[in-house]
Image (spheres, rainbow, N blue to C red):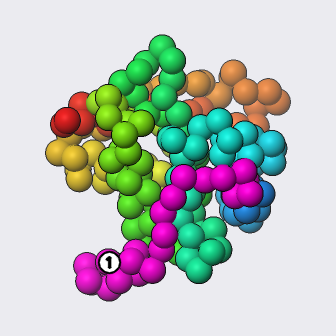
Amino acid sequence: MANKTQAVLDTFSMSKPTTSDGTPMWELVKASTLDLNSPYKYIMMCEFFSETCIVAKEKDKLVGFVTAFIPPEKPDVLFIWQVGVDASQRGKGVASKMLNELLRRNACKNVRFVEATVTSTNAASQSLFFKLAREHGTDCDVSECFPEELFPNGNHEAEFTYRIGPLSE
């Protein structure tokens, strides 16, 4: 099974996004259950945060992405805003490979922790971040971040912070 998964991953290219990746990122999210942000958000992330974002492509078709940034107040944290993988590629390790590729970048050389916020019903993201902790031989601590009542109209679940680390240097 590991060889089959590796063969699938070898067909992908991983790179920093460009502004032309913004619309395909938005379209991927629009076709999923992820929170859809404005197209501008995806284009902006590609332009201003390309060092901490990544896209996965198969034959020039975007099949996955991670938007992330290093918060100014926490220079040792890579905050994962959103992970998107095309439905046809889920379960093949694409998201995990993108996260690990990001962590190898020079821009992340001082990163000791990965953080993300995840709802209690997002089992795929929960699994992804627990797997990342296992792969790096570290902890994944979960704590409430944004309670449900912060969101307008009561139509958003509470968000929990998943904090992975410390990562070894």
Name the residue at the top extreme: 73
The answer to whether 88 is drawn above or below residue 134 in the figure is below
Given residues 25 and 162, the one toward you in this image is 25
Q: Say left or right for 84 vs 78.
A: right
Position of 17 compared to 93: left or right? right
Q: Which residues are magenta?
A: 1-22
| Amino acid identity at mark 1 | Gln
Q: Determine whether 130 is above or below 108 in the image.
A: below
Residue 139, quarter of picture: top left
For label 1, count other residues whose C-alpha is less than 10 Å away and answer few (under 14), some (14-19) or many (20+).
Answer: few
Tell me which residue sits at (59%, 32%) in the image: 158
Q: Quarter holding the N terminus?
A: bottom left
Is residue 134 in sight in this rendering? yes
Q: Which residue is labeled 1 in the image?
A: 6
Which residue: 33% across, 47% down?
Answer: 104
Can you tell which quarter of the image residue 21 is in? bottom right
Quadrant of the frame with the C terminus: top left
Q: Is residue 17 located in the magenta-colored stretch of the structure?
A: yes
